[in-house]
Image: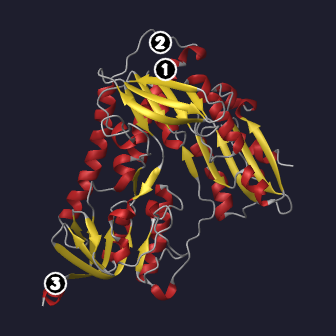
Amino acid sequence: MAQQDRSENVEKFDLIVIGSGAGLDVASAAAESGLKVALVEKSRMGGTCLNRGCIPSKLLIHSADVAQVIRTAEQFGIRVEKFSIDFEKIIRRTNGIIDSESDGIRNAFSGIENPRLFPAECRFIGKKEILVGGDSVITAEKILLASGTRPAIPKIEGLEKGTYITSDEALRLEKQPHVLTIIGGGYIAAELAHFFGSLGTKINIIQKRDVLLPREDEEVSQKFTEIFSGRYNVHLGFDTQRVTRKDNDTVVVSAKSSKTGENIEIESDQLLLATGRVPNSDTLALDLAGVRVDKRGYIAVDEFLETSVKGVFALGDAVGKYPFRHGANLEAQYAFNNISRPDKKIPVNYTAMPHAIFSSPQVASAGHTEQELRAKGVKYSKSVYPYAQTAMGQAIEDNDGFVKFLVGKDDGKILGCHILGTDASILIHEVLVSMRAGTGAIRDIQRTVHIHPALSEVVSRAADAVR
């Protein structure tokens, strides 16, 4: 009888979307196509990117970029006698923009019936039955999981709430720390070190690996590490052993070198964990739905973004393939097609999936790294061309930047492109056009007329230098 009562109270939809990041695009498109859609979001509308990731961080980083320009102005003959940082205003400006955007999305969806917004937590209670907010049960033949990720918290002695912040809190920190210790050496550490450091905070970085940005091409990570080591207190090859908080709220991080055994203790008034991210799949009770995850908790999908349960799809950070919003946006296009046209499903084309790191210097990349090609035994040619050997590179005095091409030895196909330096996130795009929409060969770049003396000449010169 209880089962019968529950069945009668289940609300049926054509599609349920969990998560309002890239999932929002699919929910909207599905509703416009005539499907009855439920959209479940437990937090602020817009997902990680809008609220706790790419967009707020770039708003903050722009302020850091401006401060850096002012600090280096004298080398261009401009003397700034005095300037000050209004940290609270920087944070207030960012939060105002972000909250307005997020609230606008929620208000728009709260005023319509389709998609129907469920602002609550949810979890599976059956194969395609979902409990929302503890009292409502919804079901659909098609379900999209876009549940995202959250900051990973490592197991370190003494590490407990109140002793640290993550990127979530760092982006809304009301008071600028005098000294900030960052555990981690990936893109989050690189971007937030630049933000706080350029505004005057003393930065300590404790990195387990021997370089910063270890997933980048080896020449990029080595140069980036060299630059950061000259700017901040960078401790490479150190394992964090213990975290303690003194009575005066000072945080002490104890770490040990994995090579020499050296022990260090670093004091700061704030500790930031930049130790990666973990999927939110563990909150959804996916086992009750029969949806498989990999050993790290990311939702397993096939080339069509379909999970182990027919009709249940997943995308974005929850899948863990390309944890970028532009990657999730791409997947959203395929997910909508494959959900709405099950007889004409299309595999996701990830060709030339790029990424960028908005630190100082910027980093941008697409394709394979040199170490990947070497490990696979691929025959390739390469070129590395410095910004400083172009007119604009000299004008802006970027003496560290370079463009690196990796090209197939036999066919001239671009296997990888890696850029470190000013506006790297912009310069990479002409390479992406070639790799994804052109012939994919280095001749696409070589045959393109580049404006002189634009900074993009460095891409042209790097392409011409391939032998």
- The answer to whether residue 459 is above or below residue 410 is above
- Marks 3/1 in contact by CB < 8 Å: the verdict is no
Instruction: Give the Cα distance between marks 3 and 2.
Output: 70 Å
- The answer to whether residue 113 is above or below residue 109 is below
Corner quadrant of residue 5: bottom left
Residue labelled with disc 3: 6
Residue labelled with disc 2: 80
Mark closest to the chain's N terminus, 1 or 2:
1
Label 1 sits on a secondary structure element that is: helix
- Marks 1/2 in contact by CB < 8 Å: the verdict is yes
Q: Nearer the viewer, mark 3 or mark 2?
A: 3
Mark closest to the chain's N terminus, 3 or 2:
3
Residue 357 drawn at (x, y percent): 54, 43
Q: Amino acid at mark 3?
A: Arg
Instruction: Give the Cα distance between marks 3 and 1.
Output: 64 Å
Mark closest to the chain's N terminus, 3 or 1:
3
Q: Nearer the viewer, mark 3 or mark 1?
A: 3
Corner quadrant of residue 23: bottom left
At horizontal 55% and vertical 24% (from top left) the residue drawn is 232
